[in-house]
Amino acid sequence: DGGITQSPKYLFRKEGQNVTLSCEQNLNHDAMYWYRQDPGQGLRLIYYSQIVNDFQKGDIAEGYSVSREKKESFPLTVTSAQKNPTAFYLCASSKAGGGTDTQYFGPGTRLTVL
Amino acid sequence: GENVEQHPSTLSVQEGDSAVIKCTYSDSASNYFPWYKQELGKRPQLIIDIRSNVGEKKDQRIAVTLNKTAKHFSLHITETQPEDSAVYFCAASGSGGYNKLIFGAGTRLAVHP
């Protein structure tokens, strides 16, 4: 899992601002994911991408956007439309295919709305 | 819809005791069941996983059992140590042709010396 990096570690946003969270991997994985984690809850899927230039909405995509222009990178933008964005955001990657590939997580970004 | 229920939400044991965490899933097509350990403020890390063609898997002090008929699987930690204290998440693979995981809400395990 050391091959997945996220930045920044902490991020503060004012209401009405868009912010972008970075996720990079050097594991040569095809699939990448974004999860949101709230206190006392499990991980909820925001977006996922199985291949470059393709991505799909997860369970809680409203107020978020992504891009996948490079295999190594899968940035997440939290838009002003996301009404309650304060959370811990985790990026993950896997080899992809078959539904049984292990997902490896990055260290996370903690976003706080001021 | 797809759902994974995890129990208990908190678990407190004495060092050296065993700990058991149970999960139930709803999608009968699920065929991959990983367990992750997350220490405070850190990333989840895979500790063990099991696939549907196996009923039990062990790795030193950790074991996972799977009952596909009943759609539940369990994590067993023996000889617990203080460093086992963390939040543990179970997950089950979802349907739809991609590598989606449905996570349980987590169990906070505290091991007291």
Image (cartoon, coloured by chain):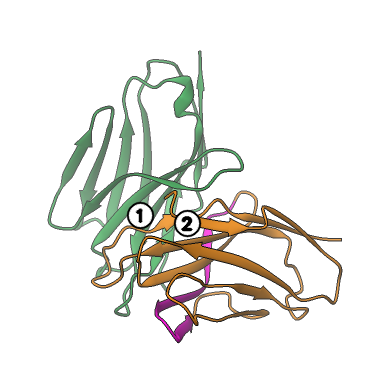
Chain colours: A orange, B green
The residue where tag 2 is placed is A4
Q: Residue furthest top?
A: B113
* Residue B61 position within the rendered picture, expressed as x and y whole percent measured from the top left: 28, 27
Which contiguous range is marked in magenta?
Answer: A41-56
Query: Position of A102 compared to B70: left or right?
Result: right
- Work out whether residue B60 or residue A105 is closer to the camera in this orientation and state it: A105
Which secondary structure class fits the magenta region best? strand
Left or right of A11, for residue B39:
left
Q: Which quarter of the picture shows residue A71?
A: bottom left
Report the label total. 2
Please state if B49 lies on the left or on the right of A69 as rendered: left
User: Which chain is indicated by disc 2?
Assistant: A
Residues at discs 1 and 2 both on one chain: no
Tell me the chain of label 1: B
Q: Secondary structure at mark 2?
A: strand
Task: Give the image location of residue A50, x and y in percent.
Answer: 38, 78
